[in-house]
Image: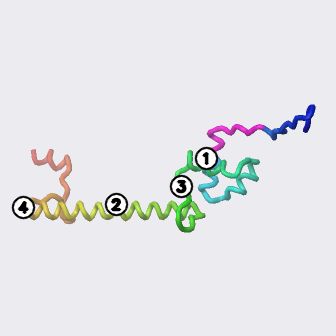
């Protein structure tokens, strides 16, 4: 468009404002794996190439790195979540083994029994009342 020899930029529609609830809904749908980003953009008429990714980084439960990582990224968020949970379980198991070893060493060095054996009967409050 020209007005008196000067070119004016014709601006497209102004960027839409989306509510936080709407953004969270989109992220939930994406992370559930039911639709990919392109499908969500088409379904809800969302503009921009990285808007959904930005929302995922802001409101998502999964990890969305800002820089490009080496290797092929996981496309399925459920598989990514499973990998995260497996890693957490592995770390928890290592902690349990470390605590068990600590207890074993303490029992041996101090000559005391810290944990009751499986066959031992747990005392209850009613047992204590009967003894009194």
Q: Which comes before the other along the chain, label 2 or label 1? A: 1
Question: Magenta segment, which residues?
Answer: 14-23
Q: Which residue is mark 2?
A: 92
Helix, strand or loop under label 4: loop
Dot label at residue 55: 1
Query: What secondary structure is marked by label 2?
Result: helix
2 or 1: mark nearer the eye? 1
Q: Residue at x 48, y 64 (%)?
A: 83
Other residues around mark 2 within 10 Å, as few (<14) / some (14–19) / many (≥20): few
**Residue at 80% across, 39% down:** 13
* Magenta stretch: dominant secondary structure: loop
Q: Rate crowding at label 1 as few (under 14), some (14 to 19) or many (20 or more) other CA atoms within 10 Å.
A: some
**Tag in front: 2 or 4:** 2
**Image x and y of residue 101, in percent:** 20, 64
Query: CA–CA distance between discs 1 and 3?
Result: 13 Å
Q: Which disc number belongs to residue 65?
A: 3
Q: Position of residue 109 (x, y in %)?
A: 8, 62
Residue highlighted by disc 4: 111
Q: CA distance from mark 3 to mark 4?
A: 51 Å
Could you classify mark 3 by the number of other residues whose Cα lies within 10 Å: few (under 14), some (14-19), or many (20 or more)? few
Which part of the image, by quadrant, shows the C terminus?
top left
């Amino acid at each position: 468009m020209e007005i008196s020899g000067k070119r004016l930029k014709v601006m497209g529609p102004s960027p839409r404002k989306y509510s936080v609830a709407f953004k969270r809904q989109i992220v939930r749908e994406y992370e559930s794996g039911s639709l990919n980003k392109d499908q969500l953009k088409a379904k809800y008429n969302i503009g921009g190439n990285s808007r959904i990714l930005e929302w995922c980084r802001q409101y998502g439960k999964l990890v969305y790195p800002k820089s490009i990582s080496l290797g092929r990224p996981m496309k399925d968020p459920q598989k990514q979540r499973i990998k995260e949970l497996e890693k957490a379980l592995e770390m928890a198991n290592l902690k349990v083994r470390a605590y068990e070893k600590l207890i074993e060493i303490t029992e041996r060095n101090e000559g005391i029994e810290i944990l009751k054996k499986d066959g031992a009967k747990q005392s209850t409050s009613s047992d204590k009342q009967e003894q009194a």
